[in-house]
Image (tube, helix red, strand yellow):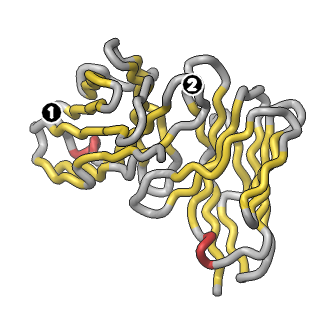
Amino acid sequence: GAVVSQHPSWVICKSGTSVKIECRSLDFQATTMFWYRQFPKQSLMLMATSNEGSKATYEQGVEKDKFLINHASLTLSTLTVTSAHPEDSSFYICSARWSNRYEQYFGPGTRLTVT
Amino acid sequence: TQLLEQSPQFLSIQEGENLTVYCNSSSVFSSLQWYRQEPGEGPVLLVTVVTGGEVKKLKRLTFQFGDARKDSSLHITAAQPGDTGLYLCAGERGDDYKLSFGAGTTVTVRA
């Protein structure tokens, strides 16, 4: 149980274009989803918290107009990187949790490369 | 400055040896989780500890949560090459369920 999927697993896009990443909880209803970014050889950095049906909460220093998050249902959250630039290249990982549980379950990650 | 300090940063041992990874903070956590991450994949949850002084065992892995809920350790007995990976501790402080991650410990077990 507690499976989280991400799509796509990797994507290459040109500078200036937008990319959408999907995060789905496959066997549970996720009351909260989180989006993280991870640079090579580094730990995970929380970008934003997403609750179903409400606006995402962004961490300090994360541009909400650049990283658009939508959590339209209890099983799906999307992260759209708008007007991507090479410095946005990174490994993006989502996680999900359900009500009254401490654990977060992570997706397999999406490798974004902006050329 | 990271909220959770993990040590050591790197650990390379021979198969069959034991190892311990530490996770320390000056903050109190309501829960602490340990994950293992393989290159190019998402972290996989190993354990969650919530009670001060709690000890949990998962086969050859033993996890401890400090009495004051500020620190934790992961001990692996008789390490195997399959234990190789990045071990991450992550703590939750409030009721927003956000996790603060340590910098990670890269463990390499040589056959």
**Whether residue A61 is visible:** no
Amino acid at pointer 1: Ser
Q: Is residue A84 above or below residue B85?
A: above
- Image-quadrant location for residue A30: top left
Amino acid at pointer 2: Tyr
Tell me if mark 1 has few (under 14), some (14-19) or many (20+) residues whose alpha carbon lies within 10 angstroms of its own.
some
The dot on residue A83 is 1
Residue under mark 1: which chain is it in? A
The dot on residue B97 is 2
Residue A29 at what x, y percent from top left?
40, 30
The span from disc 2 to disc 1 (Cα, nearest Å) is 30 Å
Residue at 57% x, 49% y: name it. B45
Residue A53 at what x, y percent from top left?
32, 14
Q: Are marks 2 and 1 in contact (CB under 8 Å)?
A: no
**Whether residue B42 is visible:** yes
Check if mark 2 and mark 1 are on a common chain: no
Residue A44 at what x, y percent from top left?
49, 43
Residue B97 at what x, y percent from top left?
57, 25
Residue at 73% x, 64% y: name it. B59
Q: Toward the viewer: A2 or A79?
A: A2
Which of label 2 and label 1 is nearer to you? Answer: 2
Could you tell me which quadrant the C terminus of chain B lies in?
Answer: bottom right
- Image-quadrant location for residue A71: top left
Q: How many marks?
A: 2
Q: Is residue B67 above or below residue B107?
A: above
Secondary element under disc 2, as helix, strand or loop, is loop
Residue at 24% x, 40% y: name it. A21
Can you name the residue that lies furthest to the top here? A54
Q: Is residue B16 above or below residue B62?
A: below
Q: Is residue B98 left or right of residue A90?
A: right
Could you tell me which quadrant the N terminus of chain B lies in?
Answer: top right
